[in-house]
């Protein structure tokens, strides 16, 4: 479904290396694999939400992430990195001020990104489908077609 969702978006690629692995997947290992494939000079960025950033210290080998890629943090409503959070100084130390900085070096920066969020979640979309509703305009038509063809998220009402 990710491949269908990004169809026609030239700057995006669905990578299935984590799905093909027979081991648990860790972001640091995935980024390491991408870095080995792309080389040391290619700019690489991982996008996470503020909620994920707040729990970053619990990630496997999280301290190595910036050696492999930049981290772009998408601000999510209701989630804030407070000045007394254990990662606050770390973020300030690595913070980038300009998105163009992501291309100037291969890794090592943290960039905050604003966006206008939709007040809808994947869980809500699945619930709409389970109730027999349509998520049209919330997901790409190709993804909605695939979900219908595969009979996904439909609950039986016996």
Image (spheres, helix red, strand yellow):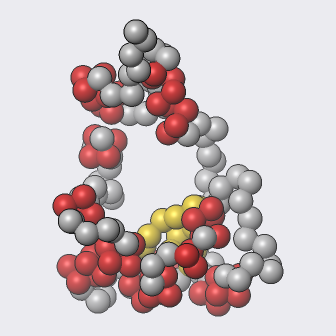
**Residue 44 visible here:** no
Where residue 13 sits in the image (x, y, percent)? 28, 57
**Residue 123 visible here:** yes
Q: Is residue 69 left or right of residue 15?
A: right
Where residue 27 sits in the image (x, y, percent)? 39, 72
> Depth check: 68 or 7 in front?
68
Q: Is residue 13 left or right of residue 127?
A: left
Q: Is residue 138 left or right of residue 96?
A: left
Residue at the location (43% across, 11% down)?
157
Where residue 150 sits in the image (x, y, percent)? 25, 26
Quadrant of residue 74 within the rendered picture: bottom right
Task: Single out the residue that lies furthest toward the top.
Answer: 158
Q: Number of labelled discs?
A: 0
Residue at the location (27% across, 46% down)?
3
Residue at the location (47% across, 30% down)?
126
Quadrant of residue 21 within the rendered picture: bottom left
Q: Is residue 52 above or below residue 31?
A: above
Q: Is residue 122 above or below residue 88?
A: above
Residue at the location (41% across, 20% down)?
155
Q: Is residue 98 above or below residue 142?
A: below
Quadrant of residue 51 within the rendered picture: bottom right
Q: Is residue 76 above or below residue 31?
A: above
Where residue 105 sits in the image (x, y, percent)? 42, 87
Quadrant where the C terminus sits is top left
Quadrant where the N terminus sits is top left
> Depth check: 11 or 35 in front?
35
């Amino acid at each position: 479904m990710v491949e269908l969702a990004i169809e026609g978006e030239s700057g995006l690629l669905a990578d299935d290396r984590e799905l093909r692995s027979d081991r648990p997947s860790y972001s640091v290992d995935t980024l390491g694999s991408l870095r080995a494939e792309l080389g040391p000079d290619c700019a690489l960025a991982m996008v996470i939400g503020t909620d994920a950033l707040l729990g970053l210290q619990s990630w496997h080998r999280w301290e190595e992430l910036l050696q492999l890629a930049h981290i772009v943090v998408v601000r999510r409503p209701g989630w804030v990195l407070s000045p007394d959070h254990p990662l606050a100084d770390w973020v300030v130390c690595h913070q980038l001020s300009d998105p163009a900085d992501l291309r100037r070096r291969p890794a090592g920066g943290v960039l905050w990104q604003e966006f206008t969020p939709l007040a809808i979640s994947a869980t809500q979309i699945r619930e709409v489908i389970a109730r027999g509703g349509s998520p049209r305009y919330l997901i790409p038509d190709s993804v909605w077609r695939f979900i219908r063809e595969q009979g996904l998220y439909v609950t039986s009402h016996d």
